[in-house]
Image: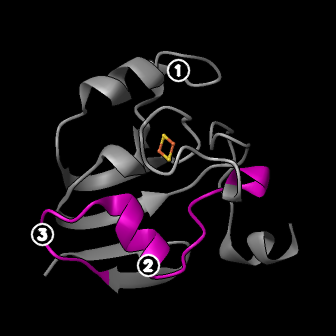
């Protein structure tokens, strides 16, 4: 069963599970700031669930490719939309600052408690 490391926590996932669903079910802080309430609920259109992923996941969907070309995202950065990703192995997932997770600094779980 794949293990996902995120924001100082470790959770197990079924292989093939949707990454956004796994993180939200574990009550892990996928969204930053106002995006916690204002997001597209996994349609792949808002871009606020962007994360950096190390590990084996599904290929980018067509919707994901389109959304990650739209600022503030930059496709060259290599971020993925958690709502469009299926877990295929152990993962290290990192969330960056900014409403869309497009910032340069990582956001720790402690900072999230105070934002
Ligand atoms: S939740 Fe909106 S793009 Fe993923």
> Residue 69: x and y, percent?
47, 16
Q: Residue at x 48, y 48 (%)?
A: 51
Queried whether the magenta region covers residue 84, the answer comes back as: no
- What's the mark number on residue 15? 3
Magenta range is: 12-35
Q: Secondary structure at mark 1?
A: loop
Front residue of 39/107: it is 39
Q: Is mark 1 within 8 Å of ligand 1?
A: no
Along the horizontal axis of the image, is 21 left or right of 100?
A: left
Q: Nearer the viewer, residue 68 or 44?
A: 44
Among the two numbered marks 3 and 1 on one chain, the one whose residue lies closer to the N terminus: 3
Which residue in the protein does label 1 denote? Answer: 74
Tell me which numbered mark, 3 or 2, is placed earlier along the sequence.
3
Residue at figure coordinates x 79%, y 77% from the top left: 113
The colour scheme used here is: one colour
What residue is drawn where x is 54% and y is 16%?
Answer: 70
| Rendered residue at 75%/70% (across/down) | 112
Q: Quadrant of residue 100?
A: top right
Q: Which mark is residue 25?
A: 2
């Amino acid at each position: 069963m794949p293990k996902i490391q995120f924001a100082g926590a470790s959770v197990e996932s079924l292989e093939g599970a949707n990454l956004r669903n796994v993180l939200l079910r574990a009550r892990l802080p996928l969204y930053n700031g106002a995006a916690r309430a204002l997001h597209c609920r996994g349609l792949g259109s808002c871009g606020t669930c962007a994360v950096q992923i190390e590990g084996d996941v599904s290929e980018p969907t067509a919707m994901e490719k389109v959304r990650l070309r739209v600022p503030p995202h930059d496709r060259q950065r290599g971020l993925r939309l958690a709502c469009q990703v299926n877990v295929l192995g152990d993962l290290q997932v990192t969330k960056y600052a900014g409403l869309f997770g497009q910032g340069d600094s990582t956001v720790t779980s402690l900072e999230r408690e105070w934002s």
